[in-house]
Image (cartoon, rainbow, N blue to C red):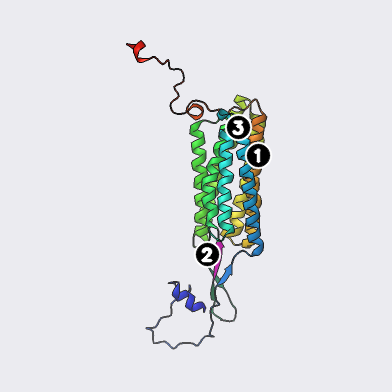
Amino acid sequence: MGDYHYQTGGKLPPGPVPDRTSNAPTVPLPTVTNPPPDFEHITDFGLRTLWVLFVLMLISTITFVVLSWRVAVPRRLLFQITTYVTLISTFTYYAMATGGGWNYHQVWVTNGHKHDIPDTHNVVLRQIFWARYVDWLLTTPLILFNIGALAALSGSNILNTLVAATAMNFAGLFAVYSHGRRTKWGWYAMAWVAFITVGWHLIVNARATARRVGGQLLYNSIALYTVVVWIGYLVIWGVSDVSRGISPNETVIAYAVLDILAKPALGFWLVLGYDKSDKTQADVGGVWSEGFGHREGNVRLDREEGE
């Protein structure tokens, strides 16, 4: 069964290829049969967790929509972006809960033996939810944009932060799907470097601008909270799908807790704190509030008066 899998997969078990051209006598070895592939996937408990997260994200999205309607359009930017974050996660969790957004990633495992018995090689097929990475690639920049706007961070630094966060997510995705231990941990190290860049912008640059505009009290706590939660994501990356240190069920639960903290919890804290604070100003006028026909500051003359 194991040999059949290797052949159909287009690969042979790792190890030296016997020399068929030599005239040296062959030494009989014990017959070793590679075991069938092991499947690592979520159970009914993990599936129920996905459904619970779908419901929580849906309720959060509806709540954020209602909260957005209560504020004037110029102050609605942070509310709308927060709504988009939980809306994307609502779609993601519905896809995963209904059986989509995942595939099996093949991992080769070598089992050593004593007494001159050849090593055996078996394949582990681990369930990976690639939909999470699509979610993070979309929602992480939105979250960072909200935090940057709250701190009145410059557009240049916001862009640098978004690019670093995107690089972090891509590196994490490549770490999970790469083959070879060194390659995996190389990508994982790159994800940490990108995260350090994000953290530096949040803790240093954005903190300084928040202090200048007088909004440091709200911003500092939110920025520190975000950095701590995202460290949790990187740790789970390392011990779950990169090193297979925890089961898929435990991975689902860990990511569920982190997603609640990073999206609905952070979102409510950010928009409610912003709505009550008179120190933070992320108001947007012009085209955002009045439309593309708006020409603020221009004096409009009729054709007849102009002539």
Residue 285 x %, y %: 52, 26
- The three-letter code of the residue at mark 1 reads Phe
Residue 76 x %, y %: 57, 32
Q: Which residue is mark 3?
A: 207
Q: Which residue is mark 1?
A: 268
**Horizontal side of residue 38 vs 52, given as left or right:** left
**Horizontal side of residue 191 vs 59, given as left or right:** left
* SS category of the residue bearing label 2: strand
Q: Nearer the viewer, mark 2 or mark 3?
A: 2
- Farthest residue toward the front? 304
Magenta span: 123-127
Residue 248 numbered tag: none
Distance in Å between CA atoms under marks 1 and 2:
35 Å
* SS category of the residue bearing label 3: helix
Task: Establish if 22 lies above or below 6.
Answer: below
Q: Are marks 3 and 1 in contact (CB under 8 Å)?
A: no
Residue 223 x %, y %: 62, 37
Task: Establish if 214 lies above or below 179.
Answer: above
- The three-letter code of the residue at mark 2 reads Tyr
* Quarter of the figure with residue 247: bottom right
- The three-letter code of the residue at mark 3 reads Arg
- Farthest residue toward the left? 307
- Of mark 3 and mark 1, the one earlier in the sequence is 3
Q: Which residue is mark 2?
A: 104
Distance in Å between CA atoms under marks 2 and 3:
42 Å
Q: Quadrant of the C terminus?
A: top left
* SS category of the residue bearing label 1: helix
Q: Are marks 1 and 2 in contact (CB under 8 Å)?
A: no
Task: Identify the residue shown where x is 43% and y is 77%.
Answer: 17
- Of mark 2 and mark 3, the one earlier in the sequence is 2
